Amino acid sequence: MTAGVVAAIDLGATSGRVIVGHVGPDTLDATPVARFANDPVQISDGLHWDILSLYGAAVKGLREAFRAAPAIASIGVDAWAVDYGLLRGGRLLGDPFHYRDARTARGVEAVHERMPHSELYAHNGLQFLPFNTLYQFAAEPRDVLEFADTALLIPDLVGYWLTGQARAEQTNASTTGLLRDGAWNDDLVSALGLPRGILPPLIAPGEPLGALLSEVAAAIGAAPGTSVTAVGSHDTASAVVAVPMRADAAAYISCGTWGLVGVEVDRPVLTPEALAANFTNEGGVDGRVRLLHNVMGLWVLSEAVRTWERQGHPIDLPTLLDSAEEVTAPVAVFDVNDPRFLPPGDMPARIDEWCAEHGVAAPRTRAEYARSIVESLAQAFADASREAGRIGGVDVETIHIVGGGALNELLCQRTADRSGLSVLAGPVEATALGNVLVQARAAGLVTGSLEALRDLVARTHAPRRYAPKA
Ligand code: LFR
């Protein structure tokens, strides 16, 4: 077996990227060849994806990728979960909504009138998040939903434009709340009064989605017949593939905009404890289950930075984090999971509000705010890791942090300190690596179980260890 090359499209919260990955039995790298903004657009009816600009930029990025590596054997697409486009006759009916749009509140009310969360949980095992796709469907005007003939989650929509094949990839489909035991849950769909016909046939990670449409292949300089492969198209599912962990003794945190904190288990955990702790059972690659909880993540810090910049204070993040590290006075540890921190907006003001309501002294300087956010995230990460182990029956000895958060030394160290466990940080590019690995295995460039893939990650991307300090 020799190394081969595949390409990944990853649409993340701060940017979209096209990545070229070289993979072989002893080789694994993922190099971004194009990066473009992924800025949601607020218009009068709400917050939307700028999906056509993103698709255009991704196609341009693929052209770069094929110029750099003409032998690319396959393409895989991932993005964040839950959001979708509605189509009729192959035509997109409008710019997809972004999950941080406030309309979801309407959907939650409509769904819970028919079925409370505890009953939904028995069906789908999903934590309550107001933006789960089923709530978004319920927030759509009825006539729009009925006019549509297909709903495609964002990576599936991109895959459709690349290949003409309309499918729903399993890991991401699990975040709709409408899947049970790997199939669409017809009973639930009908109990919620949703149109079953808009849900396309499912596809598993590693299966071929289809060949590039000839006009797409020509536009990007790919050989005719180049295929698109289904990957863990939920970005978190791809990230978990590339956590260099021993799943029976570790928790993971996929840390970017969100901190997805959990363990990997073989089957869903639907116990009263899991329900009470609001843990989710999302579909993983190879039928594994991602038993995890969404912690608000670095979003709180980036929104705080954006707020200060809007107020005319340019911020250099590394300098801010250095000054946060030097703060010696105790700072407020607030509940990062409070729903007030979900929508875009003035995070420092919301932190002040939280502190006032809880009789805690609010931070005063920007360094103190940053330190307070990092300490609060580290505490939430430590708590959720412990909970994940307890609920999933995993004796957690180590916490792995992958994604952009692995670069945040203060956060990694404080998570180790607050949990009393070693933190292993990296790889930063876990999502891209997971996407690339699943394609590479489908193409026969590597073989084996997720354990074998993780072993390759560990050999090529040794994580950095943070020991807890007393
Ligand atoms: C992370 C992520 C989370 C999901 C949230 C919204 O990028 O995909 O896993 O809960 O975004 O889709």
Image (tube, grey):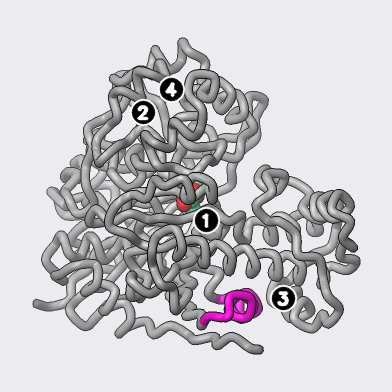
Which of the pair 218/33 is nearer the observer?
33
The CA span between labels 3 and 4 is 43 Å
Circle 4: residue type: Leu
Residue at image position (51%, 66%) is 385
Please name which of the two marks, 1 or 2, marks the residue nearer to the observer: 2
Judged from the image, the secondary structure of the residue bearing numbered disc 1 is strand
**Residue 344 x/y as whole percent:** 69, 45
Give the labeled residue for mark 4: 93
From the image, give the main secondary structure of the stretch colored magenta: helix
What residue is disc 1 on? Answer: 15
Whole-number angstrom distance, CA of label 1 to CA of label 3: 22 Å
- Please tell me which residue is depicted at 35% across the width and 23% down the height of the picture: 189
Magenta-highlighted residues:
407-421
**SS class of the residue under badge 4?**
loop
Viewer-side label of 2, 4: 2
Pointer 2: what residue?
151
Disc 4 crowd, CA 10 A, few/some/many (<14, 14-19, 20+): some
Which amino acid, by three-letter code, is at mark 1?
Ser
Q: Between marks 3 and 2, how big is the CA–CA gap?
A: 42 Å
Earlier in the chain: of badge 1 and badge 2, it is: 1
Q: SS class of the residue under badge 2?
A: strand
Please tell me which of labels 1 and 4 falls first in the chain: 1
Q: Which residue is mark 3?
A: 321
In the figure, 460 relative to 19: above or below? Answer: below
Residue 387 numbered tag? none
Mark 3 or 4: in front is 3
Expressed as whole percent of the image width and height from the top left, the position of residue 100 reads: 60, 40
Q: Amino acid at mark 3?
A: Leu
Q: Tag 3: Cα neighbours inside 10 Å, few (<14), some, or many (≥20)? A: many
